[in-house]
Image: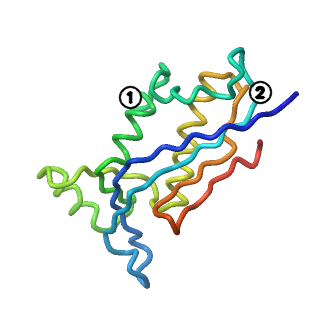
Amino acid sequence: MEKFISRKLNSGYSSCFRQWRATDTHCSFLHGYAVSFEVSFIGEIDHRNWVYDFGGFKRSSYQIQGQSLKEYFDWLFDHTVIVAQDDPFLDVFMELHDAEIIQLRVLPDVGCEMFAKHVHEVVSGLLDYETMGRVKVEYVKFIENEKNSAIYRNTNV
């Protein structure tokens, strides 16, 4: 069977986060980026000669937390503060969120690598639902700026 690869870049997000465990660097402080991520799809083409519909994040009936994938990624990454669930100042961030000073998002872990992994897992759920295994996520590249990015790769593809 022939395998094809297509890629989709999702950009335009402004996110702020901190690596609280990185106490020996400035990354332990809140800092923000205009983040983006690229999803690489691999699989057989469909009746339209596509690996995956580039507009599928918007049009899919698949939902995560009651939202389309596009809505979910907007909710997660656009003008938000993202902290790890074990951040020692989580209660302070929660107070700021409750006071409507920040839009807080809490994930198990933060940083380029963990964001790439999270996006990979979420998009993989969509693809399993929509393509029944015909298409997989080859990798997700999460980009925090023009110099720094991380890739999470599916080693089973």
Residue displayed at 53% across by 55% down: 142
Q: What residue lies at 60% left-to-right and 23% top-to-bottom?
A: 129
Q: Which residue is mark 2?
A: 44
Q: Which mark is residue 67?
A: 1
Q: Position of residue 15 (x, y in %)?
A: 35, 56
User: Would residue 141 be found to the left or right of residue 43 on screen?
Assistant: left
The residue carrying pointer 2 sits among few (fewer than 14), some (14 to 19) or many (20 or more) residues within 10 Å by Cα, namely some
Q: Position of residue 112 (x, y in %)?
A: 51, 60
Q: Is residue 42 left or right of residue 59?
A: right
Look at label 2 and name its amino acid: Glu
Tell me the element at label 1: loop
Please tell me how crowded label 1 is: few (under 14), some (14-19), or many (20+) other residues with Cα within 10 Å: some
Q: Residue at x 51, y 49 (%)?
A: 37
Residue found farthest to the top:
47
Image position, residue 151 (x, y; %): 62, 57
Q: Calculate the distance from the C-alpha at mark 1 to the C-alpha at mark 2.
A: 27 Å
Please, which residue is most extreme toward the right here? 1
Q: Quadrant of the N terminus?
A: top right
Quarter-of-image position of residue 28: bottom left
Could you tell me which quadrant the C terminus lies in?
A: top right
Q: Nearer the viewer, residue 106 or 157?
A: 157
Above or below: residue 136 compared with residue 78: above
| 110 vs 34, nearest the viewer | 34
Amino acid on which disc 1 is placed: Gln
Q: Nearer the viewer, residue 125 or 95?
A: 125
Q: Residue at x 47, y 19 (%)?
A: 61
* Sequence-wise first label, 1 or 2: 2
- Quadrant of res 127: top right
- Residue most toward the left? 99
Label 2 SS:
loop
